[in-house]
């Protein structure tokens, strides 16, 4: 190996030094710094600003209730994000981090989740979020013109909020109100009309410009009546009396006992006797691991075989007409009740007789 | 992202063999692995983007489709997720037009919203998309200007370029060591899985959904982890690029030397990528038994110091003279010394007789294994030194320092590791340093002699799991006069050994375990030494 | 159809939301000694004999699905009710939850008994807050009445039901995506196997059923099996709640036996009372199903097999009718926007391809279409076939293929609006084939 270009020996201090080799390239400013942001950047509040909204007794109770429902705390993530959004009105980054801490998952995970779902708001909206469906059924019934009408009336461009901070319009995908197409949601309520001061969604009643005007008026009246939107349980109200998920923090529930239900009987045993003896057929269940066939000999039941569960036939070569059979199935550690007793009958002759003596299957007792 | 509990099962030499039918021919493949690995084992490469042998299977790129024949007819399946079963019938593009079309379609979809900036992309030349497109792609484009592109990117980083096209974030400073190009990301999820499941610190996540998906850290946080540069390795595209290597070299200009990172006793397998006499980057080299495909930032970026502060070749006669006379000599063998260096030292010590004692390592503390590419012990070749009976440590020397008259530190930076502990050694009057670097110890020494750095020497080392691994010399020595440590030591002992192979043979004389092996036959992934079970 | 024969919607319009009203209408009659004396197997057997098929879209037999759930694994079994309906045209679950929440609870108790579940989750989509309120109110009443909680009615059986509010993702209707969402992850479908019946939510056996499926159970268990099997076709028993929307005089929810002729549904007085304008096409099972032309509609019956024979799908029973004032390009563009918006972003073909199709359709809509765009759309559709984890890409791929064939004239008309439509597109100049 020859001497490397650029390496010179500094004799004075006994050190080799170099003039070339890897060196960092000057970093240009980011593209957005040069070209400008395409989208508005949402200013994020600090934790101190939102903490008073999230660290309330009410939120604590709700979060504790949510955490008790899931075996893994992360299961409550969606719900906790809802609670945070409800408390603040939208989801600032610090609130997402708060939810992640509660649900014991990483903050980036919670951020990914919160952006995946479209109903989490990452920027504040107007007091009334008008969600217009523009999916196929609503589109067929004139959703586009309804949207345009709403925009015109409210003087809004897509993504904007009215100056008074009341209305924001968004186009959403199917709202599952296609029978009322075109349909919309005002905040959390489906609405195609206003009756007696309430938003209503009656079967077959669709949105028209007049009804939309009524709905907008309802919103304005409400804004005048209540300076702040009255609180509404974001998860549809607390349910009292549940024990939570067994093992979850705060849960009182215990796991299901495995023998809560009566053991399974074998159903529909049918025995037909022909030259080969008695052939037993039955309707088993895939849950069984073993089946025992028993025969009544002089009043006592004796085992005549274990046919397994895969093939649904058992032949008792000794079987005669009038013999009584029953079956006992085992599923895991549980043994079933014996099936009903089945009396062996003569098998029908090979060509189907005009009136086959359809052996009434010894079905289990009828329920209901 | 969903199934992060299924790590792929990789085939080994002991895998049971099963016979499957590939394109109408019976092929014997390893039976305990997935189809992709099984086909690879018999030389059929399946293009893939999201699959990585040491990451959980995510199955989202859909590039590795093959066709199977099942009870419900023929179906396309992803080979990375499907376990091999005896007798299964597989069609690859060679026999199935459907697979060919499907792979071409996936390739087209993958590149639809991917910028065509290969000429300025650092990944060009080793980009998975390029490889796949050449192999499986269509030869014509259907992406018409009217249809346009929809670049992926964080809405906060999007901008309109001079043509009015909405673009994703470019050169986003995602962390202290990494730049992110959001447009180039193909959402394969590899980096997310690496950080979550391998590094154990979920710092990255895909945000939004559909064709707006983009990769991000938590807003306002930086990607910062001891292993974060591994995401640039696993990234199949140029989305994640290492700042230190950005725009330094075209990858096709680089030559690679396979060697071992001698800063830790696990002995992470690495590639030294060099060109024009310089190392430009260090990449992990796959070794299933050692570091898999991971390497820590410390080991990776250490190369930046390799050529700095080097000692020039000294005067061998002066060195010889310093070792003459009476009084005990303490040799301190640094952790990065190879078995050959140890053999040379053994030769020299034997010649010097009772006067000389050997100590290994420095005062650097021994840490704990991190489970990836580090065992925590900075004395890389401690197991190798033990083969020669070198087990006394620098701490032992510090206790008995007054017994010695001469201290010879061999690539061991005693003062640099812990100056306060090394103070005890200052009672030794004559201090000699034979080392690559002009380190603290060299500065404390009266006589210095420059040798090759470990990246510039061939040799062997034994890692903490008793695997004998081979170092190869990268042609990056700053001075042709510099010689490996072992040849200097042999020269002091009066022998002329310049080849590592010969030195290895000599090592066999002292360490019987090494005698059974031939230097040239050592496998690139190392040899497990007899009688030692891998831990 | 008489209300008494309506399996799911019998209580509609009767203000059955409160437990008193519901019980007065015969509710909770199945939650009695006779149910608790039945074994798990007998319950499942009864559902199998009734021939109930899943109402979510795929039509898989419910009893068989339940029988796949392994017992005695040491892990809890979960029942998850899929109330994440979001397919264009489907809105039955919305009103089923709103009008008759107790029936769902009753059905869930039966299902819980059959599967040995301790915990059930109702996964309701985020927009269904009024429904969730209705269900939670019903749950409160059911807990107070002792139908839920520990040791129900003195048995060893304990059962809890929770409502999980989703947050806006159509793909969570796919069962593994729904399970992921329940676990607090993104709603992205999982690779299968393992199937949810073996390892679903929290790697435990999980059974995901549609709202309507669960709500059919109280009726099935309170009537003889023969009465249920008597309704419908030989291969699909019972009734189905049809959601009719689009250009009909009286859109709405109609429960009818399976096998009802399509035209009867659209024109009879009992149901929709006729079509507005001239019929152009009918989407029989929700927006992902290929449409039927008017001539195909004449003899079509509403059941799984007939729809399969017409190369479309019965789906969730969402019938969308459109007349000749609508253009197929327009409809397909809406679908393109929907599916590209709702793609979970996991598989490459779906993530990028649905958006690609949308942009091609947009360019045709803008009057920038070119000859060959129809083939391009069909080519994109071909790229979706069988290449993704879940069927969302095919939900767009099927319509892309069928609309462009059945309504080709519409597309040609739109493409002809571009004066330069016959000229070749501006092509990117790279042709790799020439070099490699």
Image: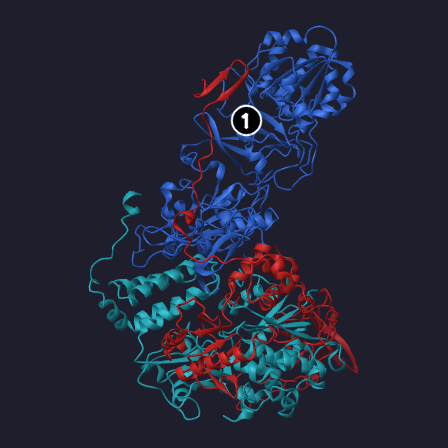
Q: Quadrant of residue C405?
A: bottom left
Question: In terms of depth relative to the viewer, which is nearer, A263 or B233?
Answer: B233
Rendering coords of residue A168 (x, y %): 46, 70
Q: Residues within 10 Å of mark 1 (few under 14, many from 20)?
A: many
The quadrant of the image that shows the C terminus of chain C is top left
- Compared to C92, does B500 lie above or below? above
**Dot 1 corresponds to which residue?**
B306
Instruction: Determine the image quadrant of residue B210.
Output: bottom left
The answer to whether A236 appears left or right of C307 in the picture is right
Look at chain A in the picture and name its colour: red
Query: Percent x, y for residue C201?
Result: 61, 65
The location of residue C250, given as percent across then percent down, is: 41, 88
Query: Is A265 displayed left or right of B204 in the figure?
Result: right
* Residue lying at 69% horizontally and 38% vertically, measured from the top left: B368
Q: Chain of mark 1?
A: B
Which residue occupies 57% across, 12% down? B314
Left or right: residue B486 versus residue A38 is right
Q: Nearer the viewer, residue B118 or B96?
A: B118
**In the figure, residue C128 lies in which quadrant?**
bottom right
């Amino acid at each position: 190996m020859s001497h490397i270009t650029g390496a010179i020996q500094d004799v004075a201090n006994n050190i080799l030094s170099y003039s070339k080799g890897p060196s960092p390239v000057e970093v240009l400013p980011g593209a957005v710094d040069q070209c400008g942001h395409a989208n508005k950047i949402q200013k994020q509040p600090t934790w101190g600003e939102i903490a008073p909204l999230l660290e309330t007794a009410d939120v604590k109770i709700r979060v504790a209730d949510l955490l008790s429902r899931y075996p893994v705390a992360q299961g409550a993530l969606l719900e906790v994000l809802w609670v945070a959004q409800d408390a603040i009105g939208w989801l600032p980054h610090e609130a997402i981090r708060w939810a992640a801490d509660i649900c014991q998952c990483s903050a980036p995970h919670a951020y990914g989740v919160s952006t995946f779902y479209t109903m989490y708001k990452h920027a504040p909206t107007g007091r009334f979020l008008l969600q217009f469906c523009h999916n196929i059924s609503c589109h067929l019934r004139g959703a586009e013109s309804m949207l345009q009408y709403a925009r015109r009336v409210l003087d809004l461009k897509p993504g904007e909020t009215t100056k008074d901070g009341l209305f924001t319009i968004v186009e959403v995908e199917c709202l599952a109100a296609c029978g009322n197409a075109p349909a919309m949601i005002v905040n959390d309520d489906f609405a195609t009309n206003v009756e007696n001061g309430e938003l209503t969604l009656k079967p077959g009643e669709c949105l028209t410009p007049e009804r939309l005007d009524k709905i907008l008026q309802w919103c304005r009246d409400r804004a005048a009546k209540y300076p702040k939107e009255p609180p509404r349980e974001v998860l549809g109200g607390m349910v009292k009396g549940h024990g939570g998920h067994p093992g979850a923090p705060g849960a009182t529930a215990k796991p299901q006992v495995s023998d809560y239900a009566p053991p399974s009987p074998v159903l529909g045993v049918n025995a037909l006797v022909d030259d080969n003896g008695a052939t037993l057929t039955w309707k088993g269940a895939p849950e069984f691991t073993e089946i025992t066939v028993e025969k009544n000999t002089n009043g006592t039941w004796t085992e005549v075989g274990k046919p397994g569960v895969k093939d649904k036939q058992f032949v008792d070569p000794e079987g005669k007409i009038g013999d009584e059979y029953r079956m006992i199935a085992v599923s895991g550690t549980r043994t079933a009740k014996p099936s009903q007793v089945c009396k062996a009958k003569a098998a029908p002759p090979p060509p189907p007789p005009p009136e086959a003596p359809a052996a009434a299957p010894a079905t289990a007792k009828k329920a209901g | 992202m969903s199934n992060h509990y299924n790590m792929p099962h990789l085939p080994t030499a002991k895998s049971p063999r099963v016979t499957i039918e590939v394109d109408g021919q019976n092929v014997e493949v390893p039976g305990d692995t997935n189809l992709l690995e099984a086909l690879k084992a018999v030389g059929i490469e399946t293009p893939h983007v999201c699959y990585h042998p040491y990451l959980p299977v995510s199955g989202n790129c859909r590039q590795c489709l093959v066709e199977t024949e099942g009870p419900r007819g023929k179906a396309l399946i992803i080979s990375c997720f499907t376990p091999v079963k005896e007798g299964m019938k597989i069609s690859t593009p060679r026999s199935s037009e459907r697979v060919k079309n499907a792979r071409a379609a996936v390739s087209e979809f993958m590149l639809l919203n991917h910028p065509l900036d290969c000429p300025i992309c650092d990944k060009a030349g080793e980009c998975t998309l390029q490889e796949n497109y050449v192999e499986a792609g269509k030869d014509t484009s259907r992406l018409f200007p009217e249809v346009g592109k929809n670049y992926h990117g964080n809405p906060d980083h999007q901008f309109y370029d001079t043509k009015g096209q909405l673009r994703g974030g470019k050169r986003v400073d995602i962390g202290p060591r990494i730049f992110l190009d959001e447009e180039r990301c193909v959402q394969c999820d590899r980096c997310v899985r690496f950080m979550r499941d391998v590094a154990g610190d979920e710092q990255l996540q895909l945000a939004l959904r559909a064709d707006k998906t983009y990769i991000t850290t938590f807003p306002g946080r930086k990607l910062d982890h001891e292993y974060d540069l591994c995401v640039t390795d696993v990234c199949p595209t140029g989305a994640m690029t290492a700042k230190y290597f950005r725009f330094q070299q075209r990858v096709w200009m680089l030559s690679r030397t396979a060697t071992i990172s001698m800063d830790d006793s696990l002995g992470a397998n690495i590639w030294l990528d060099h060109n024009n006499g310089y190392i430009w980057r260090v990449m992990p080299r796959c070794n299933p038994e050692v570091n898999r495909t991971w390497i820590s930032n410390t080991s990776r970026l250490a190369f930046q110091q390799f050529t700095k502060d080097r000692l020039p070749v000294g005067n061998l006669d002066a060195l010889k003279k310093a070792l003459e006379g009476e009084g005990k000599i303490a040799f301190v063998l640094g952790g990065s010394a190879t078995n050959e260096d140890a053999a040379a030292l053994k030769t020299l010590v034997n010649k010097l007789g009772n006067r000389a004692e050997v100590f290994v390592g420095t005062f650097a503390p021994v840490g704990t294994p991190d489970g990836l590419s580090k065992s925590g012990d900075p004395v890389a070749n401690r197991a190798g030194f033990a083969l020669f009976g070198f087990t006394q440590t620098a701490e032992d020397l510090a206790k008995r320092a007054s017994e010695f008259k001469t201290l010879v530190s061999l690539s061991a930076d005693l003062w640099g590791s812990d100056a306060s502990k090394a103070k005890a050694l200052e009672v030794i009057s004559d201090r000699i340093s034979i080392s690559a670097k002009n380190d603290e110890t060299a500065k404390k020494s009266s006589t210095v002699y420059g040798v090759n750095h470990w990246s510039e020497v061939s040799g062997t080392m034994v890692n903490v799991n008793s695997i004998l691994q081979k170092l190869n010399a990268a042609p990056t020595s700053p001075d042709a006069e510099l010689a490996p440590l072992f040849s200097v030591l042999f020269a002091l002992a009066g022998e002329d050994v310049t080849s590592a192979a010969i030195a290895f043979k000599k090592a066999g004389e002292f360490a019987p375990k090494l005698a059974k092996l031939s230097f040239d036959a050592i496998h690139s992934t190392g040899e497990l030494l007899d009688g030692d079970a891998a831990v | 159809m008489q209300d008494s024969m309506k399996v799911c919607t019998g209580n509609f319009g009767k203000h059955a939301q409160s437990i008193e009203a519901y019980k007065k209408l015969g509710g909770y009659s199945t939650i009695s000694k006779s149910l608790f004396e039945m074994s798990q197997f007998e319950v499942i057997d009864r559902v199998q004999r009734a021939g109930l098929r899943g109402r979510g879209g795929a039509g898989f037999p419910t009893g068989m699905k339940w029988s796949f759930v392994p017992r005695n694994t040491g892990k809890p079994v979960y029942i998850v009710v899929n109330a994440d309906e979001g397919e264009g045209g489907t809105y039955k679950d919305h009103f089923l939850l709103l009008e008759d929440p107790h029936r769902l609870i009753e059905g869930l108790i039966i299902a819980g008994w059959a599967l040995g579940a301790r915990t059930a989750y109702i996964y309701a989509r985020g927009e269904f807050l009024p429904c969730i309120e209705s269900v939670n109110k019903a749950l409160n009443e059911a807990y107070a009445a002792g139908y839920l909680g520990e040791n129900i009615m003195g048995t060893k059986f304990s059962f809890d039901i929770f409502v999980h509010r989703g947050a806006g993702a159509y793909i969570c209707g796919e069962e593994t995506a729904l399970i992921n969402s329940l676990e607090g992850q993104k709603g992205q479908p999982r690779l299968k196997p393992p199937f949810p019946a073996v390892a679903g939510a929290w790697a435990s056996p999980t059974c995901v059923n549609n709202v309507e499926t669960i709500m059919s159970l109280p009726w099935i268990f309170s009537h003889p099996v023969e009465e249920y099997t008597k309704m419908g076709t030989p291969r699909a028993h019972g009734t189905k709640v049809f959601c009719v929307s689009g250009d009909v005089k009286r859109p709405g929810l109609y429960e009818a036996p399976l096998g009802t002729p399509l035209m009867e549904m659209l024109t009879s007085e009992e149901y929709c009372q006729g079509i507005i304008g001239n019929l152009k096409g009918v989407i029989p099972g929700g927006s992902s199903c290929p449409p039927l032309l008017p001539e195909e509609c004449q003899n079509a019956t509403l059941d799984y097999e007939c729809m399969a024979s017409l190369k479309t799908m019965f789906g969730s029973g969402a019938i969308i009718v459109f007349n000749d004032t609508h253009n197929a390009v327009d409809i397909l563009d809406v679908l393109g926007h929907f599916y590209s918006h709702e793609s979970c972003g996991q598989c490459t073909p779906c993530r990028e391809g649905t958006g690609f199709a949308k942009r091609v359709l947009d360019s045709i809509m803008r009057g920038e279409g070119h000859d060959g765009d129809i083939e391009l759309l069909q080519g994109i559709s071909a790229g979706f076939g069988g290449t993704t984890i879940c069927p969302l890409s095919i939900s767009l791929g099927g319509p892309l293929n069928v609309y462009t064939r059945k309504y080709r004239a519409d597309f040609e008309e739109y493409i002809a609006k571009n004066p330069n439509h016959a000229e070749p597109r501006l092509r990117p100049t790279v042709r790799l084939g020439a070099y490699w």
